[in-house]
Image (cartoon, coloured by chain):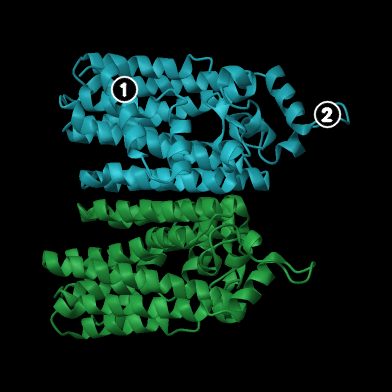
Chain colours: A cyan, B green
Amino acid sequence: MDHAKALQAVERLMIEIVESEVDVLREASRHILTAGGKRMRPRVTLLAYEAVGGDQLDVVLPVAAAVELVHTATLVHDDINDHGLVRRGRQTINAIWGRTFALLTGDFLFTKVYTLMAPYGDLNVIFAQMTSELVEGETLQAAAAKEGKLNRETYACIIAKKTAALFAGAAKLGAKLGNGTPQQVEALYQYGFNLGLAFQIVDDILDLIADSQKLGKTAGIDVAQGKGFAVAVVGNGAHSAVVVAEEPAEDPAKALKRKLLEGSYIEEGWQQARQLAAIAKRQLDCLPPSAARDELLRLADAAVEREY
Amino acid sequence: MDHAKALQAVERLMIEIVESEVDVLREASRHILTAGGKRMRPRVTLLAYEAVGGDQLDVVLPVAAAVELVHTATLVHDDINDHGLVRRGRQTINAIWGRTFALLTGDFLFTKVYTLMAPYGDLNVIFAQMTSELVEGETLQAAAAKEGKLNRETYACIIAKKTAALFAGAAKLGAKLGNGTPQQVEALYQYGFNLGLAFQIVDDILDLIADSQKLGKTAGIDVAQGKGFAVAVVGNGAHSAVVVAEEPAEDPAKALKRKLLEGSYIEEGWQQARQLAAIAKRQLDCLPPSAARDELLRLADAAVEREY
């Protein structure tokens, strides 16, 4: 099975596992799952497995599907908390089915994650750990936004937990399942961690500069809610206190966006992301050459050189 | 370790596992976990383990804690969807910390459930299955309430999934871990299933007839939201269509409650619950006599003969 076929199999697995006699759970789950997405995390799992010499892709498919499913579950719950209306170019579940069913669909996806992972013994320890960190990261972000206290340090902690832990775990799970050496497992973990950081910084920059249609979700939502890279780099403390609107009627979020676009913040963010991607790539030096390793290198480039 | 000590150890384990550097997750989790509760589900797990001859209670404690934690996670999310303000005699998490943090705390508890279960191999298949059913049951309930289509059949399906599946799973997990014979495991599963049905019917009746202070949660909330036994037994179709308010100004929920209290519905519900508890108890005939079996018998009586 080649990589493209494996990814298709992951898609099928996700669609199958959310089968339910409860219509709204099945339909809402499939609505978000068939909307596409970059599938970065399951790609990382599959490639890490292959890069350490794993050659039974069937074995790793449910784990890759579980990794994408847990990411999807948190997106569904995020969209409730952020009142997001568009996700992956489609209406969000809360926009169509309402908040109650969105919450339950997210919970349902969480339970299906563990249905997929149930046969994997000790890998569940890694999985549960990264999932806890993911929720902790989301919570830190919500708390920082609420208190208007987002700064660079908090931001680093947030993205380490909410994004990098999952990318790192995705890589580690693949590497372990492929019977990588402890050194290879650690290298792939570090690859995933740094890739995750880079990916999130770029995501936050794109939230600021890209248009909603290209993103497939409402742009500028992070800034408006006091979240993300843009808010963090402007300074310690609430962005509304830092950015003074030049016109009295100017919306604080718009004022912040203007200030960011005028300054060198965006370029600084890209720089950081590129450095992190370079660090990620260097971790792969200890792996034997392979098509999977090449693809992991390309993935790190693609994470920072993208427009949506 | 005796049963009371084991239950205390389960409490400690739950408090420990929700340790987090993220203040709100730790505090909100402990807020709900230290509020008490009947702990029916972990009791069932511990007793099922002992009833089949398990004698290393240490082994079963994390599973019992996971069972109660998954129940608690769904309570936290229920309180968001139902706008519940009081739970176990305390303010709900959403009332204190707001909806966003309540949602994330529920998610956090879900992840900790799997942290506890991670070492238990194949038991995770049972656990994931019962948790999916739980969410399906909650969703069926929300859908029936929204569409005003709750009837006896739907109600039976809802409580089978949202309550009985968890009680049944709790018993099965304990019995499997205690190396019960297949017949014993099945008997304890059936015990849990019937006990869960009985427990839920009584819960719904108490929602109707008890006062909020005794219940430790807002009474009458199910009826007001078109849910629960009371609404189901009145007839097929929306209760607002079935119950005609005698005074034009009468609230439909109040009219329903009046009608139920006047009729024989409540007594019919108790009867059903007592029959189910009796069925549950009969399942235990195949187990050797033991203190644990006696306690399981008492638990079935207590589930139906209670005032809160």
Are there few (<14), some (14-19), or many (20+) residues within 10 Å of tag 2?
Answer: few
| Chain name for mark 2 | A
Direction right: furthest residue:
A248
| CA distance for labels 1 and 2 | 47 Å
Report the quarter where the N terminus of chain A lies.
Answer: top left
**Residue found at x 85% / y 26%:** A246
At label 2, the amino acid type is Glu
Drawn side of residue B295 relative to residue A207, left or right: left
**Residue found at x 16% / y 24%:** A53
Residue B300 percent across, percent down from the top left: 33, 80
Q: Is residue A165 visible?
A: no
At label 1, the amino acid type is Gln
Drawn side of residue A163 relative to residue A170, left or right: right
Q: Are marks 1 and 2 in contact (CB under 8 Å)?
A: no
Direction left: furthest residue:
B181
**Residue found at x 60% / y 48%:** A143
- Residue with the mark numbered 1: A8
Q: Nearer the viewer, residue B88 or B307?
A: B307
Q: Secondary structure at mark 1?
A: helix
Drawn side of residue A295 relative to residue B240, left or right: left
Are there few (<14), some (14-19), or many (20+) residues within 10 Å of tag 1?
Answer: few
> Which of the two labelled residues, at mark 1 and mark 2, occupies the earlier sequence position?
1
Checking the image for residue B59, the label placed there is none
Q: Is residue B275 above or below residue A201?
A: below
- Residue with the mark numbered 2: A250
Residue B2 percent across, percent down from the top left: 25, 82
